[in-house]
Image (spheres, grey):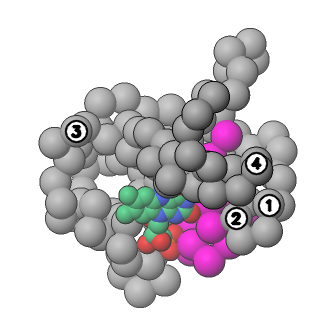
Amino acid sequence: MTAPQNNASMNFEAFFKISYGLYVVSSNNGTKLNGYVSNAVFQVTAEPAQFAVCCSKNNYTAELINGSKAFSISVLKQEASPELIGVFGYQSGKDIDKFKDVEFITGTTGVPILTQDSLAWFECKVIQTVDVGTHFH
Ligand SMILES: Cc1cc2nc3c(=O)[nH]c(=O)nc-3n(C[C@H](O)[C@H](O)[C@H](O)COP(=O)(O)O)c2cc1C
């Protein structure tokens, strides 16, 4: 193996170029609906069907997921509008109502599921939370 390494165990150049999809992870607390743009969403097991999502502790959505123990994942289209990504990925639901002007449905657990600019969606229940420092998984 001849790829350049920044140190013995990690090639940071490659580390920051790992490919991802683009998703919106959403939840609610009974009154407030919210969601955030995420690239860190993974299918971890097929049977049972399980995802891992990586959510910053600073995200308002983290508070909602910890309370409701449920969330949705919307798979964004490649052509998802920059405005939608701007609202969900660069603003906090602490300050604005992100679901005010977007298309969504409500899941059986009560969570909002963004359908606008989305190819597919999943509704999930939290079965385990791992504290990884800055983020929850
Ligand atoms: C392309 C992109 C990818 C992102 N991926 C993540 C992620 O995987 N996990 C995360 O916690 N935040 C991620 N963010 C940041 C959140 O979307 C952003 O901080 C958001 O405003 C949090 O919203 P909230 O405070 O309303 O929950 C990403 C943002 C962008 C633009």
Label 4–label 3 contact, CB within 8 A: no
How far apart marks 4 and 3 lie (CA) works out to: 33 Å
Does residue 137 sit above or below 77 in this rendering? Answer: below
Mark nearest the camera among 4 and 3 is 4
Asked whether, in this view, residue 85 is left or right of residue 18, the answer is: left
How far apart marks 2 and 4 lie (CA) works out to: 23 Å
| Mark 2 CB near ligand 1 (8 Å cut) | yes
**Which residues, given as a range, are shown in magenta?**
52-67
Q: Residue at x 83, y 61 (%)?
A: 131
The residue that mark 2 highlights is 135
Which numbered dot is residue 14?
none
**What amino acid type should be assigned to the residue bearing mark 3?**
Gln
**What amino acid type should be assigned to the residue bearing mark 2?**
His
| First of labels 2, 4 by sequence position | 4
How far apart marks 4 and 1 lie (CA) works out to: 20 Å
Name the element at disc 1.
loop
Does residue 51 sit above or below 89 in this rendering? Answer: above
Q: Is residue 59 one of those drawn in magenta? A: yes
The residue that mark 3 highlights is 78
Name the element at disc 3.
loop
